[in-house]
Image: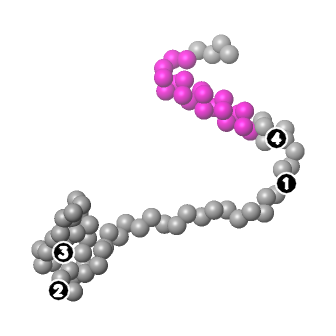
Amino acid sequence: NGRLILSTPDAIGKALDDYLKEKEQQLNCSEELPHDDKPLITMAPISTDTKISTCDEGTHDLINENGCIVCRQCGWSKCD
């Protein structure tokens, strides 16, 4: 469209600006869309807990560490 682009970040910024302006125009020009009564999909939270079970003593938690099941308290481990 004849605009001067001075750098890659400038080009990215102008492209984003053009995109947002185009989307805004589409929203302003379009008729009211029918409301979709479908519920939004909510993803379950990702668990960061790597606890497997308990060690041979039955009192300490096991974790998966580098492909091995390890008890940090008593030192027990089992690797695949």
How many tags in the picture? Answer: 4
Instruction: Compare marks 3 and 4 and give the one earlier in the sequence.
Output: 4
Q: Which residue is drawn at 79% across and 58% down?
A: 36
Instruction: Compare marks 1 and 3 and give the one earlier in the sequence.
Output: 1
Q: For the residue labelled by badge 1, is the local secondary structure a helix, a strand or a loop?
A: loop
Q: How far apart are marks 4 and 2 (CA)?
A: 67 Å
The kind of residue on which mark 2 rests is Glu
Q: Which residue is drawn at 68% across and 16% down?
A: 1
Image side of residue 2 versus residue 63, left or right: right
Please give the residue where the numbered disc 4 appears in the rendered image: 28
Q: For the residue labelled by badge 4, is the local secondary structure a helix, a strand or a loop?
A: helix
For the C terminus, the quadrant is: bottom left
Picture quarter containing residue 71? bottom left
Q: Nearer the viewer, mark 1 or mark 3?
A: 3
Q: In this view, does 17 lie above or below 65?
A: above
| CB-based contact (under 8 Å), mark 2 and mark 1 | no
| CB-based contact (under 8 Å), mark 3 and mark 2 | yes
Image side of residue 36 versus residue 44, left or right: right
Which is nearer the eye, 38 or 55? Answer: 55
Q: Is residue 21 above or below residue 65?
A: above
- Other residues around mark 4 within 10 Å, as few (<14) / some (14–19) / many (≥20): few
Q: Is residue 51 above or below residue 79?
A: below
Instruction: Compare marks 4 and 2 and give the one earlier in the sequence.
Output: 4
Q: How far apart are marks 3 and 2 (CA)?
A: 10 Å
Q: Residue 34 carries which label?
A: 1
The kind of residue on which mark 3 rests is Cys
Please give the residue where the numbered disc 2 appears in the rendered image: 57
Q: Distance between the residues labelled 1 and 4?
A: 15 Å
Instruction: Compare marks 2 and 1 and give the one earlier in the sequence.
Output: 1
At which x and y percent is residue 22?
A: 72, 33
At which x and y percent is residue 39?
A: 71, 65
